C-alpha cells in the first residue's frame, strides 16, 4: 500500500513539473511579446507596462531617456513612485477603473519636472489572460505640455478660457490630429446636449455627420498649404438629430504636433430663413410667371431688369429680349416711349405709386392697358428701381363703350316711344271730346268719319304696344330661342291670308313664288313675326293698284326670302336709319296708314338671333326690296 502511494506521488510530481515548465515557457513568451511591444512602440510616446498592483514590468527607451535612468533601476518599482516620486497612486489615475470594467481608459496627468509643469495624456489598455483576468496593463503616455505652454505664453490662461471659450456665443473646441477633443467651451455641451464628462470621451468622428462633410481625415488633407478652413456641415446631437453649423477651423502647429482650433456656429435659423426665402422666391416666381398681367422691373435709366412670360403671350416678344434694353431700344413707337418714360420719371422722383392708361396696337388691333407703376425702395429710402404691372383692359373698355352706347340708345329709344305713344292720343282725344260735346248735332256721316279716325288711332296704338312688348321680351330673354325645321312657304301664305282684306282694299296684286326647298332651321315664332312685319310694311307703302312680289330661293347652306313692292321707296339717307333703335324714322303709308317705328328693329333682332341677316334695297319712287336669309 505504501508502495502504491509512493508511485502516485511520484507520478503527480512529474505532472506538476511539466505544468510548471509550460507556464514558465508561456510567461517567457508573454514577457518577450510585451518587451517587443514596448521597444517597438512610437519613440515619441512613453510606453510602460504594469501589473494590477502598479508594479512596473517594462518601459520603453523614450521614457528611460526622459527620466534619465537605466531600466534595471526602475523595473519592479511602483509606477507612481518611479515616474512622479509619489508614495500613492495618482489622483487622476483610471487604472482601478480599467481593472474593474476591463475597458480602455484615459486620464490627464500634470506634474513638476525640473522646475516646470508638464502635462501628459495617458491611455490605459488592459491585457487579459485566457481566463479573462487582467494580467498586465499597457500605459501609453503622450506629453502635451506644448499646448498648455502655448496658452501660458499667450499669457492669462484663465482669461483665455473665460473670454474665448465661455463668453463667446459660438461653440469652441480644440482637437488633435487623431480627432480627440482636448478642450471645449461651455456652449458645446449645450449645442450637442452632452454633459461635459460625456464630451471628454468623444472624438470629432462621433459628432460630425459624414454624409454632410468630407470626413475628418479629408478635412485634415485640405489644410495642406493653408492654415484656415471655412465650411458647412451637420453635427450630431446626443439625441441623434442633426444641427447645421458653419465651421471655422484653424491649424495650430506646436513643436511637431498639429492642433486644430474649431469654432462651430449654429446656422439652423439662418438655414430655415434661407429655405423660407427660397420658398418665398419660388412662390413669387410661380405667381409672376403665371400671371396674366405683363409684369416688368425697370432701373433708373428705364432699362428692363425683369419681364415675365406674359410678354410672349401679349406682345409676342420673348422676355429675354427685353433685358437690359429700354422701350425705345425695343422699337416701340416714339410717342409711347416718351409717355412711358415721363410716367416712370414721375414715380422715381416722387417715390409714389401711380396708375395710367394707354392704348397700343398689337397685330393691327388696338388694345387698352392699365399701367400701374410701383416704386421699390432701398434701405436708405431711395427709389432706384420700380415695378410695372400692365393689364389688358380691352374687353373692359369695349364693354364700357357698349354700355355707354346702350344707355344712349335706350334714352333715344324711350324718347321715340314717348313721342310715338303720344301721337295717336293727339287724334283720339279731340275726336272723342268732339263726339261727347256734339253727338246730338252731328249727322251720321260726320260721326262715322270721326269713329273711323279714332279706330285707326287705337289700332296704331295697339300695334305699337304689341311691337314694343315683343321687343322688350326679346331684350329681357323672355322669348326663348327654340330653333327647328320650319316651312317658310306655309308662314308666308298664313300672313298673306291675314292681310287679304288690306290687299283687297288697296287693290294690290301679290305674286308669290316659293322655292324648290322652303325649309329653314329657326325659331318659328320669331320668323313669323318678321314675315308679318315685312308683308304689312310692303302693303302700307304700296300705292293702290300696285304690285308686291315674294319669292324664296335656297343654296347649300342658306335659304333667302325676298319681298318687293313698287311703292314710294326710301332715300339712301333714310335707309341708314332703318333697323336702328337710336333713330326716329317713321312715316305714314300711301293711304296715310300709321306705323309703329319699331317693326324693322324687331325684324333685325329676331333674324340675327337665328343666325341670319337682313338687308334693304330701295329707290325713291320705284319701291323697296327687303331680304333676309336663314340657315337651313
Image (spheres, helix red, strand yellow):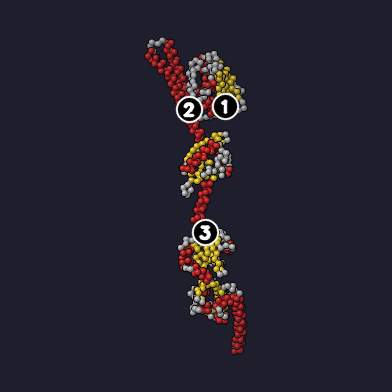
Q: Say whether residue 413 is left or right of residue 226.
A: left
Task: Give the quadrant of residue 424.
Answer: top left
Report the number of numbered marks.
3
Q: Mark 1 near mark 3, Cβ–Cβ under 8 Å?
A: no
Q: Nearer the viewer, mark 2 or mark 1?
A: 2
Q: In which quarter of the image is the N terminus?
A: bottom right
Q: Name the residue under label 3.
A: 245
Residue 631 shows in the view: yes
Q: Which of marks 3 and 2 is nearer the N terminus?
A: 3
Mark 3 is surrounded, within 10 Å at the Cα level, by few (under 14), some (14 to 19) or many (20 or more) other residues, namely many
Where does the C terminus fall, quadrant-wise? top right
Q: Tell me the SS state at disc 3.
A: strand
Q: Nearer the viewer, mark 1 or mark 3?
A: 3
Mark drawn on residue 409: 2
The percent position of residue 515, horizontal first and vertical second, equals: 60, 22
Q: Quadrant of residue 615?
A: top right
Label 2 crowd bin: few (<14), some (14–19), many (20+), radius 10 Å: some
Chain-order first, disc 2 or disc 1: 2
Measured Cα–Cα span from mark 3 to mark 2: 75 Å
Q: Distance between the residues labelled 1 and 3?
A: 80 Å
**Camera-side residue of 371 and 323:** 323
Q: Residue at x 48, y 64 (%)?
A: 165
Q: Which of marks 3 and 2 is in front?
A: 3
Name the residue tied to disc 1.
Answer: 630
Q: Which of 440 and 275 is in front in this view?
A: 275
Answer with mark 1 or mark 3, whichever residue precedes in sequence.
3
Amino acid at each position: 500500500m505504501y508502495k502504491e502511494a509512493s508511485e502516485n506521488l511520484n507520478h503527480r510530481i512529474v505532472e506538476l513539473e511539466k505544468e510548471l515548465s509550460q507556464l514558465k515557457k508561456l510567461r517567457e513568451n508573454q514577457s518577450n511579446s510585451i518587451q517587443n511591444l514596448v521597444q517597438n512602440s512610437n519613440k515619441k510616446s512613453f510606453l510602460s507596462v504594469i501589473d494590477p498592483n502598479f508594479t512596473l514590468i517594462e518601459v520603453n527607451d523614450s521614457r528611460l531617456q526622459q527620466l534619465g535612468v537605466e531600466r534595471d533601476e526602475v523595473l519592479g518599482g511602483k509606477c507612481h513612485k518611479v515616474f512622479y516620486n509619489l508614495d500613492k497612486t495618482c489622483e487622476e489615475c483610471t487604472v482601478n477603473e480599467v481593472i474593474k470594467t476591463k475597458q480602455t481608459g484615459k486620464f490627464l496627468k500634470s506634474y513638476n519636472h525640473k522646475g516646470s509643469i508638464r502635462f501628459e495624456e495617458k491611455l490605459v489598455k488592459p491585457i487579459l489572460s485566457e481566463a479573462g483576468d487582467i494580467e498586465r496593463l499597457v500605459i501609453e503616455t503622450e506629453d502635451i505640455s506644448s499646448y498648455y505652454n502655448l496658452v501660458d505664453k499667450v499669457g492669462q490662461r484663465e482669461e483665455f478660457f473665460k473670454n474665448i471659450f465661455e463668453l463667446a456665443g459660438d461653440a469652441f473646441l480644440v482637437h488633435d490630429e487623431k480627432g480627440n477633443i482636448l478642450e471645449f467651451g461651455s456652449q458645446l455641451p449645450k449645442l450637442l446636449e452632452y454633459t461635459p464628462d460625456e464630451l471628454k470621451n468623444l472624438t470629432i468622428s462621433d459628432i460630425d455627420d459624414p454624409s454632410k462633410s468630407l470626413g475628418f481625415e479629408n478635412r485634415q488633407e485640405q489644410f495642406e498649404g493653408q492654415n484656415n478652413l471655412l465650411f458647412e456641415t451637420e453635427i450630431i446631437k446626443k439625441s441623434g438629430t442633426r444641427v447645421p453649423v458653419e465651421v471655422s477651423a484653424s491649424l495650430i502647429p506646436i513643436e511637431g504636433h498639429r492642433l486644430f482650433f474649431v469654432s462651430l456656429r449654429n446656422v439652423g435659423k439662418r438655414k430655415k430663413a434661407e429655405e423660407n426665402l427660397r420658398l418665398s422666391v419660388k412662390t413669387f416666381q410661380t405667381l409672376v410667371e403665371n400671371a396674366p398681367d405683363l409684369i416688368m422691373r425697370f432701373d433708373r435709366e428705364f432699362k428692363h431688369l425683369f419681364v415675365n412670360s406674359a410678354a410672349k403671350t401679349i406682345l409676342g416678344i420673348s422676355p429675354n429680349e427685353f433685358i437690359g434694353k429700354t422701350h425705345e431700344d425695343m422699337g416701340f413707337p416714339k410717342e409711347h416711349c416718351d409717355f412711358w418714360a415721363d410716367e416712370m420719371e414721375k414715380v422715381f422722383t416722387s417715390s409714389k405709386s401711380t396708375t395710367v392708361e394707354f392704348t397700343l396696337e398689337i397685330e393691327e388691333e388696338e388694345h387698352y392697358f392699365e399701367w400701374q407703376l410701383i416704386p421699390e425702395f432701398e434701405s436708405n429710402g431711395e427709389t432706384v428701381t420700380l415695378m410695372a404691372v400692365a393689364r389688358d383692359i380691352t374687353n373692359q373698355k369695349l364693354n364700357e363703350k357698349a354700355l355707354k352706347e346702350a344707355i344712349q340708345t335706350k334714352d333715344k329709344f324711350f324718347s321715340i316711344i314717348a313721342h310715338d305713344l303720344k301721337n295717336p292720343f293727339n287724334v283720339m282725344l279731340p275726336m272723342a271730346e268732339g263726339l261727347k260735346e256734339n253727338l246730338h248735332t252731328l249727322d251720321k256721316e260726320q260721326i262715322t268719319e270721326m269713329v273711323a279716325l279714332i279706330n285707326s288711332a287705337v289700332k296704331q296704338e295697339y300695334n305699337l304696344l304689341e311691337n314694343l312688348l315683343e321687343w322688350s321680351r326679346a331684350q329681357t330673354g323672355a322669348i326663348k330661342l327654340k330653333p327647328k325645321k320650319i316651312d317658310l312657304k306655309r308662314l308666308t301664305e298664313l300672313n298673306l291670308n291675314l292681310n287679304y282684306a288690306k290687299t283687297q282694299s288697296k287693290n294690290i296684286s301679290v305674286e308669290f313664288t316659293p322655292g324648290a326647298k322652303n325649309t329653314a332651321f329657326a325659331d318659328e315664332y320669331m320668323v313669323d313675326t318678321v314675315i308679318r312685319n315685312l308683308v304689312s310694311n310692303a302693303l302700307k307703302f304700296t300705292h293702290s293698284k300696285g304690285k308686291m312680289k315674294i319669292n324664296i330661293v335656297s343654296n347649300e347652306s342658306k335659304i333667302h326670302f325676298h319681298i318687293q313692292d313698287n311703292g314710294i321707296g326710301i332715300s339712301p339717307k333714310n335707309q341708314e336709319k332703318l333697323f336702328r333703335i337710336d333713330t326716329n324714322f317713321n312715316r305714314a303709308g300711301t293711304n296715310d296708314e300709321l306705323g309703329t317705328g319699331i317693326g324693322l328693329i324687331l325684324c333685325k333682332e329676331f333674324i340675327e338671333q337665328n343666325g341670319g341677316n337682313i338687308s334693304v334695297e330701295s329707290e325713291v319712287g320705284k319701291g323697296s326690296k327687303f331680304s333676309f336669309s336663314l340657315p337651313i
